[in-house]
C-alpha cells in the first residue's frame, strides 16, 4: 500500500476498529452511512451495520468477506442497512465457504420488521432482490449460506449466544424511540469494543 494508505490503518496485529462510515441519513454530509469493521490480526472479523457506501470502504480497506464471522445490526433504519445486498452480491466473487451469520434486533412493532423478516424482504424468494435468495439455502450459488438470527431488543437482559474461540458477541436492548435497537459488545481476548448505534436512553 502507499504511504497515504498505510497512515490510515492501525497495523496488522492486535484488535482495531475501522469506521467505514459515520454519516447520517442526510445526502449532503459527504460521508458513508454508519458501519464499523472490527479487525483482529489483520483479518476483518465483525461488521456492525452496513450503511450506504460502506461496501466501498470495505473494499478499499482490502477486507475479505470470507474472513467475517458475522454482520450485526444495531437497528434496521435504511442509513444503517442499505448496503447489505451489495455485500451479499459482492461475496459471490469471493471464496467464502463458511456460513455467514447475520444478527439484528427482533421486533414487536408492526411498523418495523425483525431482522429475519427484513433479510427475507430483501433477498428472500419474494424479496426485492429475489435472485439472491439461494444464499439463504444449502444450494447457495455463493458457496456459503447466510444464516439470520433475531436478537432480543426489549427488556434489560444481556444476550450472548454467539461466539467462537476468537470472538464473542453480546448485545443489550437500547432505546431508540419506537425503533427496535440494540447495542453490541465484541470481545476479542482482553479487548472489548462497544458499538451503541443510535439510542437515547
Image (cartoon, rainbow, N blue to C red):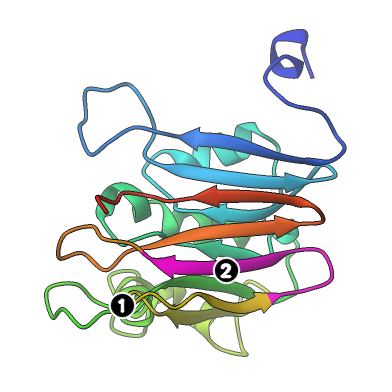
Q: At x 70% / y 17%, what residue is drawn?
A: 5
Which residue matches tag 1?
154
Question: Residue 93 sits in which quadrant?
Answer: bottom right
User: Residue at label 2?
Assistant: 170
Q: Which of the 4 image quadrants contains residue 10?
A: top right
Give residue 143's position: percent from left, percent from top.
69, 75
* Chief SS of the magenta region: strand
134 vs 68, nearest the viewer: 68
Above or below residue 6? Residue 142 is below
Compared with 136, 63 (above or below) is above
Specify the quadrant of the image occupied by residue 180: bottom left
Vertical side of 28 occupied by 40: above or below: below
Where residue 120 appears, as percent x and y from the top left, is 35, 80
Mark 2 closeness class: few <14, some 14–19, many ≥20 residues within 10 Å: some
Residue 166 magenta: yes
**Magenta-colored span:** 163-173
Of all residues shown, which one is farthest toward the top? 3
| Quadrant into which the C terminus falls | bottom left
> Can residue 116 be seen?
yes
Amino acid at each position: 500500500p502507499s504511504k497515504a494508505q498505510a497512515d490510515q490503518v492501525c497495523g496488522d496485529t492486535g484488535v482495531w476498529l475501522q469506521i467505514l462510515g459515520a454519516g447520517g441519513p442526510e445526502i449532503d454530509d459527504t460521508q458513508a452511512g454508519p458501519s464499523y469493521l472490527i479487525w483482529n490480526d489483520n483479518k476483518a472479523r465483525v461488521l456492525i451495520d452496513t450503511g450506504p457506501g460502506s461496501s466501498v470502504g470495505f473494499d478499499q480497506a482490502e477486507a475479505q468477506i470470507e474472513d467475517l464471522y458475522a454482520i450485526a445490526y444495531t437497528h434496521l433504519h435504511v442509513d444503517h442497512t442499505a448496503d447489505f445486498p451489495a455485500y451479499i452480491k459482492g461475496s459471490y466473487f469471493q471464496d467464502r465457504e463458511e456460513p455467514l451469520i447475520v444478527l439484528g434486533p427482533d421486533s414487536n412493532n408492526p411498523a418495523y420488521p425483525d431482522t429475519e423478516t427484513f433479510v427475507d424482504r430483501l433477498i428472500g424468494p419474494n424479496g426485492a432482490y429475489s435472485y439472491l435468495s439461494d444464499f439463504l439455502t444449502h444450494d447457495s450459488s455463493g458457496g456459503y449460506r447466510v444464516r439470520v438470527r433475531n436478537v432480543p431488543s426489549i427488556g434489560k437482559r444481556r444476550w450472548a449466544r454467539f461466539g467462537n474461540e476468537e470472538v464473542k458477541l453480546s448485545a443489550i436492548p437500547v432505546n431508540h424511540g419506537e425503533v427496535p435497537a440494540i447495542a453490541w459488545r465484541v470481545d476479542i481476548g482482553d479487548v472489548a469494543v462497544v458499538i451503541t448505534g443510535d439510542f437515547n436512553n
